[in-house]
Image (cartoon, rainbow, N blue to C red):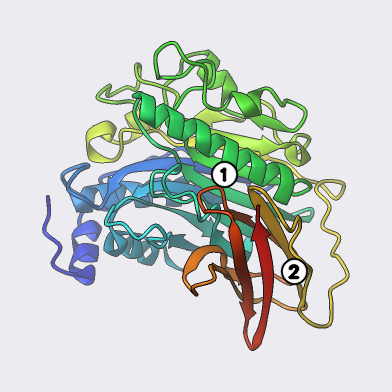
Amino acid sequence: MIQRYGFFFLLLLVSSLSAAAQNIPVKGSGATLDVATWNIEWFGASNGPSNDALQLSNVKAVIEQSAIDLWALQELADQEDFDALLDMLGDNYDGVRAENDCGTSFEQRIGFIWKTDLFTIQRLQPILTSSCFEFAQRLPLQLDARIALPDTTVEITFITVHMKATGDNDSYNRRVAASGLLKNQLDFLLRTTPVVVLGDFNDELGRSISSGRTSPYVNFLDDPEDYAFTTLPLDQQNLATFCGSSSACTSGSTLDHILLTDELFDAYMADSGDRFIELTSSINNYVNTTSDHLPVIARFYFDDTGVSTEQEELPTTITVKSAFPNPFEQSTTLTYSLPEPTYVRIEVFDMLGRQVAMPANGFASAGTHQALFDARNLPPGIYLMRLSAEDFVRTQRIVRL
């Protein structure tokens, strides 16, 4: 492992390896929206590929040469390496590595990289913030974006996930629980929003890697009117996205997936969902130098009749509705509206003044939003929910039965 002698020295090392990864196939198109998910094995940490600079150079080449518009990334283990990657990509790209929202020392984080000429970020925040255990200390990260395409402008929500790994009973149960939480979020809080969920789901769709069990994602598969996996054909053909030690990725498991809500069915270009298998030949010794996962890609085409971009009538002041339901048994939802983009923080306190949850903590666009307070792990009682936005503060009393 190359020792970290500083950000700029790392860039110097990478520049000396700039020819290491060449001839990466172009996957993006100027007329379409092209997205990908990629688990970059322990990016920047000693647990993964042994040569930091070579891994960084290869990752930069893939992102830059493939011309994909948005990358959902997992296993971003080192902030310095991620900063170096963004610096090398230049002004054409921007990105974020998630904060340590679960308060653990676990290095792996998730994140996004996007093209700056296409994407205007409206909101970026972790979701399901009371579910660190179910999501293996890596909370889902939600990005709401306005995307300027040649024929239209669309607004889409992207969520990246990295589910609990391995086939043991506890890990399987955590994936099942996380899948249920994610579907509830989409069903109730994003029910009319075009959403793309991308990530390392750490399980297959036709069956589970946990022997003899159904897929943890059968809840989505059983709802085909509302959800579709672009990666289902890969799964059905046993085409691996996790290569393990297979240099040509001829064995392994289909663990990386892209999930769509029904608002995007018409825009999705059929059969464009594929794994980036060309990387095993374009990059020398890809599995050992870059990642043990392949990126998975999907393509969308929108014309002026595509996803609606009509804007709601904005309020003139910040408004907050009463949480509903209240009283509640397991969860309640707070609806609020903003006249302009601002940073929003929603906290929940018990009657001793202790913070017990943070349903929202991030930048939010102008318009109406909803924040879910999941109280299943908290005792019945009276709680205070406080929304803060700039100088505005509003507190409500809520009751869990």
- Residue nearest the viewer, comparing 284 with 316: 316
Closer to the observer: label 1 or label 2? 2
Mark 1 residue crowding within 10 angstroms, few (<14) / some (14–19) / many (20+): many
Tell which of 320 and 248 is nearer to you. Answer: 320
Residue at left offset 53%, top offset 67%: 350
**Residue tagged 1:** 35
- In 3D space, how far apart are the residues under numbered discs 1 and 2 (Cα atoms)? 30 Å
Q: Secondary structure at mark 1?
A: strand
Q: Position of residue 134 (x, y in %)?
A: 45, 42
- Structural crowding at the residue carrying mark 2, measured as other residues with C-alpha within 10 Å and reported as few (<14), some (14–19) or many (≥20): some
Q: Is residue 55 above or below residue 243?
A: below
Q: Position of residue 71 (x, y in %)?
A: 50, 49
Q: Amino acid at mark 2?
A: Tyr
Q: Are marks 1 and 2 in contact (CB under 8 Å)?
A: no
Number of on-image labels: 2
Q: Residue 62 at what x, y percent from top left? A: 40, 45
- First in sequence: mark 1 or mark 2? 1
Residue visible at 55% across and 52% down? 128
User: Residue 397 occupies which quadrant of the picture?
Assistant: bottom right
Q: Is residue 205 left or right of residue 65?
A: right
Q: Nearer the viewer, residue 144 or 282?
A: 144
- Kindly tell me whether residue 32 is visible in this rendering: no
Kind of element beneath mark 2: strand
Q: In the displayed image of the protein, which residue is found farthest to the top?
A: 212
Q: Quadrant of residue 233?
A: top right
Vertical position of residue 364 compared to residue 227: above or below: below
**Can residue 349 be seen in this snapshot?**
yes
Q: 196 or 296: which is nearer to us? A: 196
Mark number, residue 260: none
Question: Residue 308: percent from the left, percent from the top?
Answer: 84, 52
Which residue is tagged 2? Answer: 336
